[in-house]
């Protein structure tokens, strides 16, 4: 049984079914609806989707990113451009989260995987025949319970006890805005003192995903469901110039959430129970790897599982160090984008420009350990 019909949960169900393992999914939401915003599926996550036969569906539902660009909030021109066209064999996808979940759900239903909606899990009990307790008091048992149930996972709690996340001192706004004019097919990071913006086109260029991060001492409750006033977002980034300006001006609805650091779970498995994705290793959004790590987890868990506790130990051994390394790299990115001291910003940006001009291939290679990983091989 898979708990959670998000990206990791649906992918895990498909990975198990591909290996002939009977599987069912339970989801607390009453419907799988259009929620979330944009995300980036890099080649390491795309490798799992392709191995599941979903490569054509991925390409049909996404735009192929041609570059990742770093720029300054006031000065024209690029600080650094990573030309992804130098990797013609790697597909970097820009897409809406709902579109990815939609194609995974369609594949799961086509494969005959039962998906039970409106089934909130309140407790998971590891054991030789683990039990899942629902909000209505009913109990179901399974040979294996997979917790793909996100940040506040009852499955994680069953294995690790209560979590103690801490506020990072950063809040994030997220919005999807309509586009009046096309944007380049690139993910652009706009760096400012104590702040940064990320934006890229979605859905055939009809929309743009916008994420804005600001350092702030006052914390916001975790979770992105909290609505905020678009004028607050615009005031926070009032000094931003360039292509981000019309996007900020076009925001009519925006979500706000506090960024919290959760420890990577010490235990990813117990008797008949395993966790993946955010339930195992929540990550900050500074390398766009949350969904990609969940896809990798799903494949490796199904590939490892042979019905024994030892196979779950192999799963954790294959995944935990990589997840921790990616998360640590994402944590480091925040301060690089937010340098406040003017001379330090100028020196850092000049260095990036020189490296991008003199050694563009080397700048790309620094991320090969992330994007070049193919867990399906």
Image (cartoon, helix red, strand yellow):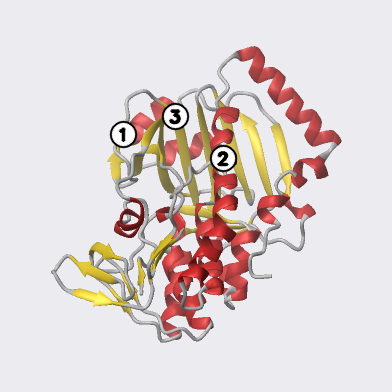
In this rendering, position of residue 224 left or right of residue 290: left
Is disc 2 surrounded by few (<14), some (14 to 19) or many (20+) residues within 10 Å? few
Label 3 SS: strand
The residue tagged 3 is 214
**Would you name the residue on which mark 1 appears?**
220
Circles 1 and 2 in contact, beta carbons < 8 Å: no
Residue 277 image offset from top left, x and y in percent: 46, 57
Q: Can you say whether 1 is above or below 250 in the image?
A: below
Q: Could you tell me which secondary element the residue under label 2 belongs to?
A: helix
Which residue reaches farthest right?
Answer: 358
Q: Sequence order check: which comes first, mark 3 or mark 2? A: 3
Q: Taking 288 as reference, is 163 left or right?
A: left
Q: CA distance from mark 1 to mark 2?
A: 23 Å
| Residue at the (32%, 56%) spot, across then down | 153
Which one is closest to the eye, mark 1 or mark 2?
Answer: 2
Circle 3 or circle 2, nearest the eye: 2
User: Does label 1 or label 2 sit earlier along the sequence?
Assistant: 1
Residue found at the very far left of the displayed protein = 137
Q: Residues within 10 Å of mark 1 (few under 14, many from 20)?
A: some
């Amino acid at each position: 049984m898979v708990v959670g019909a998000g990206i990791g949960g649906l992918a895990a169900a498909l990975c198990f079914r591909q290996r002939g393992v009977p599987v069912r999914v339970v989801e607390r939401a009453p419907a799988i609806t259009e929620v979330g915003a944009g995300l980036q599926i890099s080649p390491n996550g795309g490798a799992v989707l392709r191995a599941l036969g979903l490569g054509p569906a991925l390409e049909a539902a996404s735009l192929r990113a041609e570059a990742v660009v770093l720029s300054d909030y006031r000065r024209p021109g690029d600080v650094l451009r990573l030309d992804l066209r130098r990797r013609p064999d790697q597909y970097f996808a820009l897409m809406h989260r709902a579109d990815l979940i939609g194609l995974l759900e369609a594949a799961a239903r086509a494969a005959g995987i039962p998906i039970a909606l409106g089934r909130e899990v309140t407790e998971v009990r590891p054991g030789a025949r683990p039990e899942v307790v629902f909000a209505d008091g009913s109990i179901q048992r399974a040979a294996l319970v997979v917790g793909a149930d996100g940040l506040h996972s009852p499955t994680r709690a069953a294995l690790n006890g209560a979590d103690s996340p801490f506020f990072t001192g950063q809040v994030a706004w997220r919005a999807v805005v309509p586009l009046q004019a096309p944007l380049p097919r690139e993910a652009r990071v706009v760096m400012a003192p104590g702040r940064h913006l990320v934006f890229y086109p979605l859905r055939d260029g009809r929309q743009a995903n916008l994420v804005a991060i600001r350092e702030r001492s006052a914390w916001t409750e975790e979770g992105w469901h909290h609505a905020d006033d678009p004028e607050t977002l615009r005031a926070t980034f009032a000094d931003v110039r360039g292509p981000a300006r019309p996007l900020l001006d076009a925001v009519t609805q925006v979500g706000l959430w506090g960024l919290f650091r959760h420890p990577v779970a010490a235990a990813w498995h117990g008797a008949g129970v395993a966790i993946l994705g955010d339930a195992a290793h929540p990550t900050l959004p500074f390398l766009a790897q949350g969904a990609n790590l969940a896809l990798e987890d799903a494949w490796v868990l199904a590939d490892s599982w042979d019905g024994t506790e030892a196979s779950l130990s192999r799963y954790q051994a294959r995944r935990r160090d990589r997840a921790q390394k990616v998360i640590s790299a994402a944590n480091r990115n925040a301060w690089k984008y937010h340098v406040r001291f003017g001379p330090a910003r100028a020196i850092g940006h000049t260095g990036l420009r020189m490296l991008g001009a003199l050694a563009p291939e080397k700048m790309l290679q620094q991320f090969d350990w992330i994007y070049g990983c193919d867990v399906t091989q």
